[in-house]
Image: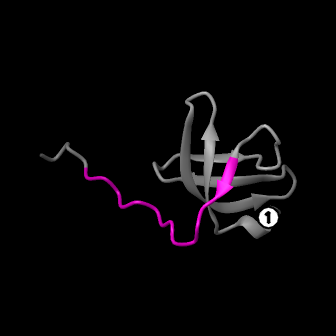
């Protein structure tokens, strides 16, 4: 499995144990000094994830696993 800069541009799914939920997103950047990847999640959240941490569960998504279309807001209704 690729690592470091090789993951930039890939789509992944990360398991957040505190919420017991998998979240999908795209890796936008790799920071070598901290060995973290900037993951922009489909819900708009952005986090620097340490994908080398053995306690963090994550998996690569298939290249065809595009981000879901944005949901329409009910505010304008």
Residue 23 position, x and y percent, is 54, 46
Residue at image location 54% in from the left, 52% down from the top: 24
- Count of marks placed on residues: 1
Q: Please say if 6 is above or below 72.
A: below
Q: Does the magenta-highlighted stretch encompass residue 62?
A: yes
Residue at image location 74% in from the left, 41% down from the top: 56
- Please name whichever residue, 62 or 16, is drawn nearer the observer in this view of the structure: 62
Residue found at the far right of this picture: 33
Residue 74 position, x and y percent, is 20, 44
Horizontal placement of 59 versus 69: left or right? right
Q: Residues within 10 Å of mark 1 (few under 14, many from 20)?
A: few
Residue at image location 35% in from the left, 57% down from the top: 70
Residue found at the far top of this picture: 18
The residue where tag 1 is placed is 1
Instruction: Locate residue 38: give its quadrant.
Output: bottom right
Residue 13 position, x and y percent, is 60, 52
Residue 49 position, x and y percent, is 71, 46
Horizontal placement of 75 versus 21: left or right? left
Residue at image location 64% in from the left, 60% down from the top: 27
Q: Does the magenta-highlighted stretch encompass residue 26?
A: no
**On the rendered image, what quadrant is the N terminus found in?**
bottom right
The residue tagged with tag 1: helix, strand or loop? Answer: loop
Q: What's the magenta region?
A: 58-72
Q: Please say if 69 is above or below 45.
A: below
Q: How is the image coloured?
A: one colour
Task: Tell me which secondary structure the magenta stretch mostly adopts.
Answer: loop
- Please name whichever residue, 31 or 54, is drawn nearer the observer in this view of the structure: 54
């Amino acid at each position: 499995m690729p690592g470091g800069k090789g993951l930039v541009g890939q789509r992944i799914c990360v398991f957040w144990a505190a919420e017991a939920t998998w979240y999908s997103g795209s890796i936008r950047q790799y920071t070598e000094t901290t060995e973290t990847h900037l993951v922009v999640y489909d819900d708009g959240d952005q986090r620097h994830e340490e994908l080398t941490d053995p306690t963090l569960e994550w998996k690569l998504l298939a290249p065809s696993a595009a981000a879901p279309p944005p949901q329409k807001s009910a505010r304008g209704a």
